[in-house]
Image (cartoon, rainbow, N blue to C red):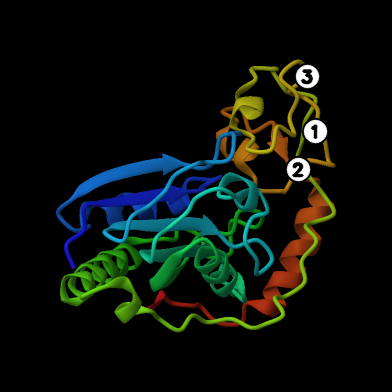
C-alpha cells in the first residue's frame, strides 16, 4: 500500500506522549508527513483523508478513557476507508478501554484502525510511579513498533485488509474526571505560562494564579510548564492518589502493541 501522506495528531500535556511521537515520525513510511499539535485550545479540525492517507492519533489515558478534549478537536475529521493507528501512554496502571474507545470513534468517522500501541509514561500526578519512563528501552520498542507498522503498510492492498482487533470492553469504563485541580502557590509570579499551556482555558489569562475547576481536566500541563514550581496539586490529593495507585500498580508494565 503506497501512502501519499501520514498525519500525526498528538495531545501531550506533559510532553511524554510527544517524545514517543517524535520517535515514531523518524520511522514512518516515505511520504509527506504532517504533525498536528492537539494540545492548544483550538477550533474543531476539518480535514478529509483519502484511502492513501494515514492518521495516527496519540494521547495519554485519563482514568482508562480518552481525554474529553479530543472529542471536540477531532469532531469533524473524516476518512475514506483511511488507515489509522492509535498510540496511548499511561502511568503504569492500565489503559483500560481508551484504545477501543478511540478505535470506535475513528471507525465512526470513516477510518480503519490497522494498529495500536500502549506505552508506559511517568505518572503525571504521582511522578515516582513509572519515574523516568519512557526510558531508552521503551524508545527501542517505539522504534520496533514503527518499523513493524511500516512493514505492515507496505504489505497491504488496502486499509480494510489490515483491520486489527483492539483491546477494551463495551460499555467503556466509567470515568467522570478527577475531583481536584492544580492551583498556584503564594509564590506565583503571574508569568502566564500556565494560562498559555492549558488546553481547556481553565487558567484565566488575566489571573493565571487561579484555576477554573469546572474546565480543568487535571492534565497537569500547567504544572509541567511552570518554571518556578508554583503550580501543583494539594498534598492531600497527591497522597490519596499515590495510596490508590500503589495498590493498583503491583507490577511494572511493559509496552504492548497490536498489528
Q: Name the element at disc 2.
A: loop
Q: Position of residue 240 (x, y in %)?
A: 81, 63
Position above or below: 121 against 245: above
Q: In the image, is 208 to the left or to the right of 129?
A: right
Q: Which mark is residue 68?
A: none
> Residues at badges 2 and 3 in contact (C-beta under 8 Å)?
no
Q: In the image, is 38 to the left or to the right of 184?
A: left
Q: Position of residue 215 (x, y in %)?
A: 78, 40
Q: Residues within 10 Å of mark 3 (few under 14, many from 20)?
A: few
Q: Which residue is mark 2?
A: 216
Q: Residues within 10 Å of mark 1 (few under 14, many from 20)?
A: some
Position above or below: 209 against 242: above
Inspect this view and state whether residue 259 appears. Answer: no
Q: Name the element at disc 3.
A: loop
Q: Which mark is residue 207?
A: 3
Sequence-first disc among 2 and 1? 1
Residue at the (34%, 49%) spot, across then down = 7
**Distance from the alpha carbon under mark 2 to that under mark 1:** 7 Å
Q: Position of residue 190 (x, y in %)?
A: 70, 17
Inspect this view and state whether residue 66 appears. Answer: yes
How many numbered marks are there? 3
Which sits in the foreground, 220 or 10? 10
Q: Which residue is mark 1?
A: 211
Q: Residues within 10 Å of mark 2 (few under 14, many from 20)?
A: many
Q: Position of residue 36 (x, y in %)?
A: 42, 41
Sequence-first disc among 2 and 3? 3
Q: In the image, is 204 to the left or to the right of 137?
A: right
Q: Picture quarter containing residue 135?
A: bottom left
Which sits in the foreground, 239 or 46? 46
**Distance from the alpha carbon under mark 2 to that under mark 3:** 15 Å
Report the quarter where the N terminus lies.
Answer: bottom left
> Residues at badges 2 and 1 in contact (C-beta under 8 Å)?
yes
Amino acid at each position: 500500500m503506497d501512502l501519499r501522506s501520514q498525519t500525526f495528531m498528538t495531545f501531550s500535556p506533559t510532553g511524554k506522549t510527544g517524545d514517543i511521537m517524535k520517535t515514531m515520525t523518524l520511522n514512518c513510511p516515505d511520504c509527506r508527513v504532517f504533525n498536528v499539535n492537539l494540545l492548544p485550545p483550538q477550533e474543531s479540525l476539518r480535514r478529509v483523508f483519502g484511502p492513501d492517507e494515514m492518521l495516527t492519533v496519540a494521547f495519554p489515558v485519563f482514568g482508562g478513557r480518552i481525554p474529553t478534549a479530543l472529542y471536540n478537536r477531532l469532531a469533524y475529521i473524516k476518512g475514506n476507508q483511511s488507515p489509522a493507528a492509535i498510540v496511548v501512554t499511561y502511568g503504569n496502571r492500565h489503559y483500560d478501554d481508551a484504545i477501543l474507545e478511540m478505535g470506535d470513534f475513528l471507525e465512526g468517522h470513516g477510518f480503519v484502525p490497522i494498529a495500536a500501541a500502549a506505552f508506559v509514561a511517568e505518572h503525571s500526578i504521582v511522578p515516582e510511579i513509572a519515574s523516568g519512563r519512557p526510558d531508552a528501552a521503551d524508545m527501542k520498542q517505539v522504534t520496533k513498533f514503527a518499523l513493524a507498522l511500516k512493514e505492515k503498510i507496505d504489505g497491504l492492498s488496502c486499509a480494510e485488509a489490515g483491520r486489527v482487533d483492539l483491546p477494551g470492553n463495551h460499555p467503556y469504563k466509567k470515568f467522570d474526571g478527577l475531583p481536584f485541580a492544580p492551583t498556584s502557590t503564594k509564590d506565583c509570579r503571574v508569568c502566564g505560562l500556565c494560562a498559555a499551556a492549558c488546553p481547556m482555558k481553565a487558567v484565566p489569562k488575566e489571573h493565571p494564579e487561579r484555576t477554573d475547576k469546572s474546565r480543568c481536566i487535571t492534565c497537569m500541563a500547567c504544572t509541567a510548564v511552570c518554571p518556578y514550581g508554583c503550580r501543583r496539586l494539594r498534598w492531600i490529593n497527591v497522597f490519596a492518589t499515590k495510596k490508590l495507585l500503589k495498590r493498583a500498580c503491583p507490577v511494572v508494565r511493559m509496552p504492548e502493541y497490536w498489528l
